[in-house]
Image (cartoon, rainbow, N blue to C red):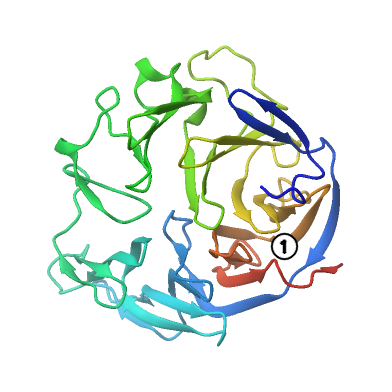
Amino acid sequence: MSARFLAGLVSVVGSLGSLHIWAKDPQIQRVQYPTIESRSFVHNLPLPSEIEWIDDERVIFSGYEEGVEEALPNGNRVLKEGIYIFSTKTGKALRHADGELACFGRGRIRYVVRTFDGGNPRGKFTTYAGPLGTESEVPGFSRRTTIENRFSCTQYDRQKIPRVSGLPPYFLLEEHGYLELTFSAEKTWQDPVRFIRTDGRAISFPVKQIEMSSPKVKWYSQRGVYLIYDASPSEVNDRSEPKKPKRIGVPKRLFLLSPDGALEILEIPYHAWHRGLGRFYLTKRGVLMVTRGRASSAASYLEEVFLLRDDHWESILEAGGITNAAISADGCRAAMGVAKRRAMRPLLQVIDLCGQGRRK
């Protein structure tokens, strides 16, 4: 992390790495950054591979557009899902192929196309994979026999991979190794999360596997780090101790892991309005946080996007619904699906965080 970015944080250096803590009650400013909006809809569900950057100018995503429809076996007509590539230069999204994006990484793609031939009401599913632009039909992907690397779309035979208590590990990029993270195996709940490098060296995290019950892991090539955190809310009971009181007020910990094993920890302070919930992304200007909006109530649920800066937070967007986001390799642009109201389909938006922000 840059010295400027950490200027407003309390830093503690220990044997397990550096710990950076934001002030408990940071000043929050409303700031608007330059934004481009596509006319194409993003897939409603926030799937892990739904939105990805091809390079610093193009975004690939699953979505729909008005006028492109298909007929279901029951006669109903619906928007036909497709793979779109959005250019920040032209402001337009071009349809690359029919289907749903299943994986994109290091220039390789895998997607699944559903067609209806009249016989099967569920339709026929065909898988395509390969380098973007030259993908071809391949055999279907079976999770019983195969596991896929989320970062490279490489597929491994389940019989030939390392095991942790009989379960597959969490694979990182092939040249880096994997995480021992098997929260579903009860006998490992109290074991620490460990990073196993390709040379066999093991680095332990200061966190138990049970505390990573819903892990999110993302690689940021420009920073050369993985961002790792537990996506479950802070207000939950520890499953190993069902009678333990709710951990209300516990800050959210973000782990930044370098391939050499160096570890940084960022602590996001707990606030009642977001209840420890949030999705987090690294950018050139700070940490991007998508969470429950401060104005939300039982009658009106909103989501809000914050940019956590040096000594203050910036509220940059508020909407009825926000999908998963993706950050460009240069760390300057954030792409996400934004629905102004929860009943609306989300449109793709690209926010230029390195552009000139304007206070509201």
Above or below, 63 against 149 in this view is below
Q: Residue at x 59, y 52 (%)?
A: 281
Q: Secondary structure at mark 1?
A: strand
Q: Is residue 17 above or below residue 149?
A: above
- From this viewpoint, is residue 302 visible? no
Which one is nearer the viewer's eye here, 88 or 292? 88
Q: How many marks?
A: 1
Residue shown at the point (50%, 56%) measured from the top left? 221
Q: Nearer the viewer, residue 32 or 225?
A: 225
Percent x, y of residue 134: 24, 77
Task: Describe residue 114's horizontal placement relative to residue 310 as left or right.
Answer: left
Quarter of image, res 158: top left
Q: Is residue 187 left or right of residue 321?
A: left
- The amino acid beneath tag 1 is Leu
Which quadrant of the figure has residue 105? bottom left
- In this rendering, position of residue 184 left or right of residue 330: left
**Residue 315 at x, y = what percent?**
77, 57
Find residue 247 and report its horizontal and vertical position in percent. Answer: 66, 23
Q: Quadrant of the C terminus?
A: bottom right
Q: In x, y percent, where is residue 229?
A: 54, 38
Q: Which residue is located at x 66 percent, y 47 percent? A: 1
Residue at which label 1 appears: 317
